[in-house]
Every structure is written in structure tokens, then in C-alpha cells.
Image: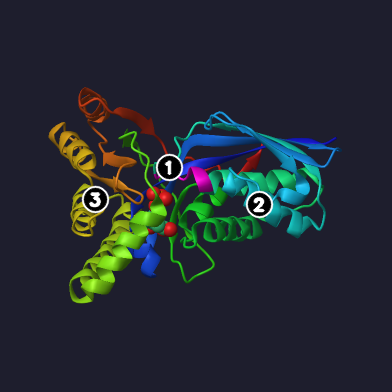
């Protein structure tokens, strides 16, 4: 028997969501909320998965890895890790998550990357972070049908990254951004929202293409301002406006953005795919007031600091 625990952080997208699907850059930060994957080999050729984020456990023979029902990211991650190690084994997998699921905080990327590393560790195969990020991206791509490399890169490497989808290397920016996250509690599907934007773009390219182009420009400008210690509030507000134009906001997200700004945030926007999930507020001098304003509306708020620690063996 071999037991290993691996953790990986969640993330918030600071700038560039949706436009990154069309090759524009994104700016993303790992946050100090993690998913822990504890994994132990077992010799009866069964895989058992349980998670504090899911009501139902799952157990099946190794041969049913591709067809079992439930935990699609974990099953795909185990499948690709078996492929990478050239070995298969029965496994007990226990997930403990500090990241709410389906909310744009990167739980699927985090659990995918941590699971691949844990399986490789338990089966005695070393794997580089570059390879982990690539395999993690493959998990997301194969489960969702479409995915940018943003989430899997940041959960692997940690920190704040400037991700250019067509480049293998991601630029690391040495900064820690204190953000307030507002959580609507509304679960939504990234795939469906990406599809809505694609349909809108196909129907009216002359209107939608410039919006995507401008989100890309804002992201490049935000990188410049962050590197020079300048304020990013106004850029966040403009980016939010463009996401509204893409149709991915919701009444709850808009009310949280407004409440945050009224309470003194310098900028606020949707983070992630939108439609529910989360928003972020940049409030260096009014964090408590912003968190209180969000909670007053009946939603959850939490502080999230950037973490430099990517995927790691505990
Ligand atoms: O899954 P989320 O909410 O973090 O959204 C991902 C960001 C998108 O740009 C909408 C999609 C992607 O794959 O980058």
C-alpha cells in the first residue's frame, strides 16, 4: 500500500475570461483555498472515490474507469495518470475541498491536477509541473469539450500568471493582490456559458469581435499596471461592462458588483464564466466594508489572498 496526499489551489480570473477562449491573454491568480486529494493504492482492483463536496460516494472495478457514473474529472485524471505511468491499480481516493464547486473558482482544474500528481506519486512515477499542467488541461478539455489552459496552469504553478493560450510558457508576475470574493451560491456550467458566447459571436461577429478584442487589450494593460504598482480598479470595471455586453452576467452578479463599488471598492467584476458563481472586488482600503455589503445582500463573502504555492505533496 502506498498513501499520498496532494493539494492544489483554486483561482480567480482577474482579467480576460471568455476572450481567452479566442486566443486573447488572461490574468489569473491562485488563491489560498485548496483541494486536498488523499490517495491510497488497494489490491482488490477497485476504485473508491469520496468527497466532502459531493453527497454520493462512488466505487467501481478499475475496468469501468471510463464508463462509471460520477466524478468525471477525477476518473479522467486517473485514466490519464495510468496512461502516463503505464500501470493500473485499485485506489481509495478521498477529496477534501475548500473551494465551492461550479462557481468559477477552479475546483475542477485543481482536483484534476492534484489527482494526476497523487496517482503518479502512489505508483512511483515522477512527473514535472510542465507535464502536469498539460495533462490537467487534457482532462478539462476531454471532460468539457473545450477549455483554455488558464485554470490548470495556475493551479499547477501558483502565483499570478499572464497566460497566452498559444504559448507554452506563462509569465509569472510577482504580486499579491488582496481581493474580496463574493459568492452567489448559484452553480452554473462553464461549457454552456462559453457556448452562449460562441453563438452570439457567430450571429453578430461585427459587434462581438471588437468586445473580445477590447477585453484582450484591457488584460494587457492590466498586466502593465500591476507590474508598475498602479491601480487596476477602473480596468476591472470596464472589463465587467464588456462581460455584461457578452451576456454572461446575472442580476445577482450585477447587484454584488454595485454593492462592492458603493462600499468603496476601487473595481469589481465577474470572475470566471459568469451566469452565477463569483465576482471579485479590488478593495485595498475597504475590504471589510465591501465584505459586509455583500453579506448584507444575503450572499457569502470571503477574503482571498494570492498564494504562490501551486500543486504540492503534503
Ligand atoms: O470555469 P470558470 O468559471 O473559471 O470559467 C473559465 C473561463 C472561461 O474563459 C469562460 C473559459 C475558459 O476555458 O477559459
Look at mark 2 in the image and give the residue it sits on: 67
Is 58 on the left-hand or right-hand side of 195? right
Q: Where is residue 49 in the image (x, y as percent from the top left)?
A: 66, 36
Callout 1: helix, strand or loop?
loop
Q: Foreground: 116 or 62? A: 62
Q: Where is residue 52 in the image (x, y as percent from the top left)?
A: 55, 28
Residue sitting at x 56%, y 60%: 142
Callout 3: helix, strand or loop?
helix
Q: How far apart are marks 1 and 3 (CA)?
A: 22 Å
Callout 2: helix, strand or loop?
loop
Residue sitting at x 67%, y 53%: 66
* Mark 1–mark 2 CB contact (< 8 Å): no
Is 74 on the left-hand or right-hand side of 24? right
Q: Distance between the residues labelled 1 and 2?
A: 22 Å
Is 119 on the left-hand or right-hand side of 53? right
Above or below: residue 301 compared with residue 237: above
Tag shown at residue 236: 3
Which numbered disc, 1 or 2, marks the residue that appears first in the sequence? 2
Look at mark 1 in the image and give the residue it sits on: 102
Amino acid at each position: 500500500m502506498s498513501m499520498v496526499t496532494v493539494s492544489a489551489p483554486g483561482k480567480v480570473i482577474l482579467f480576460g475570461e471568455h476572450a481567452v477562449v479566442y486566443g486573447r491573454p488572461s490574468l489569473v491568480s491562485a488563491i489560498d483555498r485548496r483541494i486536498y486529494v488523499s490517495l491510497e493504492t488497494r489490491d482488490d482492483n477497485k476504485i473508491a472515490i469520496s468527497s466532502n463536496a459531493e453527497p454520493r460516494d462512488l466505487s467501481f472495478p478499475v475496468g469501468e474507469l471510463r464508463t462509471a457514473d460520477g466524478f468525471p474529472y477525477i476518473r479522467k485524471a486517473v485514466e490519464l495518470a495510468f496512461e502516463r505511468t503505464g500501470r493500473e491499480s485499485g485506489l481509495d481516493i478521498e477529496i477534501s475541498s475548500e473551494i465551492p464547486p461550479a462557481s468559477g473558482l477552479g475546483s475542477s482544474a485543481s482536483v484534476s491536477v492534484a489527482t494526476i500528481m497523487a496517482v503518479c506519486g502512489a505508483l512511483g512515477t515522477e512527473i514535472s509541473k510542465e507535464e502536469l499542467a498539460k495533462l490537467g488541461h487534457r482532462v478539462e478539455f476531454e471532460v468539457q469539450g473545450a477549455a483554455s489552459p488558464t485554470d490548470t496552469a495556475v493551479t499547477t504553478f501558483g502565483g499570478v500568471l499572464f497566460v497566452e493560450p498559444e504559448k507554452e510558457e506563462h509569465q509569472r508576475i510577482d504580486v499579491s493582490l488582496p481581493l474580496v470574493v463574493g459568492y452567489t451560491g448559484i452553480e452554473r456550467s462553464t461549457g454552456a456559458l462559453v457556448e452562449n458566447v460562441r453563438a452570439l459571436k457567430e450571429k453578430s461577429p461585427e459587434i462581438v469581435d471588437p468586445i473580445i478584442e477590447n477585453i484582450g487589450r484591457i488584460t494587457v494593460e492590466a498586466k502593465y499596471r500591476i507590474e508598475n504598482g498602479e491601480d487596476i480598479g477602473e480596468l476591472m470595471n470596464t472589463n465587467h461592462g464588456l462581460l455584461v455586453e457578452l451576456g454572461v452576467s446575472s442580476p445577482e452578479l450585477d447587484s454584488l458588483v454595485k454593492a462592492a463599488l458603493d462600499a468603496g471598492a476601487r473595481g469589481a467584476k465577474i470572475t470566471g464564466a459568469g451566469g452565477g458563481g463569483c465576482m471579485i472586488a479590488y478593495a485595498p482600503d475597504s475590504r471589510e466594508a465591501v465584505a459586509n455589503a455583500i453579506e448584507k445582500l444575503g450572499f457569502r463573502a470571503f477574503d482571498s489572498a494570492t498564494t504562490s504555492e501551486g500543486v504540492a505533496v503534503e
